[in-house]
Image (cartoon, rainbow, N blue to C red):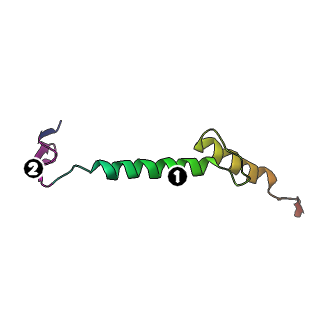
């Protein structure tokens, strides 16, 4: 098990199975940057939930799976060498 000591804003030493190394510098991220990242991710998820036909799905996963299934269901197929639409 690794032993992590020190503070995130200073210098930290990490030792464990892989030996020992030092992490220097600030690892803290400004709150404004974190808020911006959260907002960007929220907008991206809302965008994924909106289907190509304008349907808003409950989750991003349902949106993707349903739209892919619709493509599969509405794609032409070939049976006995003939295109079936």
- N-terminal of the pair, mark 2 or mark 1, is 2
In this rendered view, identify the residue nearer to me: 49 or 15. Answer: 49
The answer to which quarter of the image holds residue 82 is: bottom right
The answer to which quarter of the image holds residue 60 is: top right
Which residue is the site of mark 1?
44
Helix, strand or loop under label 1:
helix
Residue drawn at 12 percent across, 43 percent down: 7
Asked if disc 2 and disc 1 are in contact, CB closer than 8 Å, the reply is no
In this rendered view, identify the residue nearer to me: 49 or 31. Answer: 31
The span from disc 2 to disc 1 (Cα, nearest Å) is: 35 Å
Q: Position of residue 41 (x, y in %)?
A: 46, 50
What's the mark number on residue 27?
A: none
The crowd level at tag 1 (other Cα within 10 Å; few <14, some 14-19, many 20+) is few
Which residue is the site of mark 2?
11
Helix, strand or loop under label 2:
loop
Q: Position of residue 50 (x, y in %)?
A: 65, 49
Residue drawn at 39 percent across, 52 percent down: 36
Instruction: Please tell me whether residue 24 belongs to the stretch shown in magenta.
Output: yes
Q: Which residues are magenta?
A: 6-25
Q: Is residue 5 left or right of residue 68?
A: left
- Which quarter of the rendering shows the C terminus? bottom right
- Which quarter of the rendering shows the N terminus? top left
**Which marked residue is nearer to the observer: mark 2 or mark 1?**
1
In this rendered view, identify the residue nearer to me: 29 or 85. Answer: 29
Residue drawn at 70 percent across, 49 percent down: 67
């Amino acid at each position: 098990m690794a032993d992590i000591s020190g503070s995130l804003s200073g210098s930290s030493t990490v030792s464990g199975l892989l030996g020992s190394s030092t992490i220097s510098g600030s690892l803290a991220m400004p709150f404004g940057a974190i808020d911006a990242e959260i907002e960007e991710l929220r907008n991206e998820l809302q965008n994924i939930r909106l289907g190509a036909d304008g349907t808003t799905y409950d989750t991003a996963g349902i949106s993707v799976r349903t739209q892919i299934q619709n493509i599969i269901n509405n794609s032409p197929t070939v049976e006995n060498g003939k295109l079936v639409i």
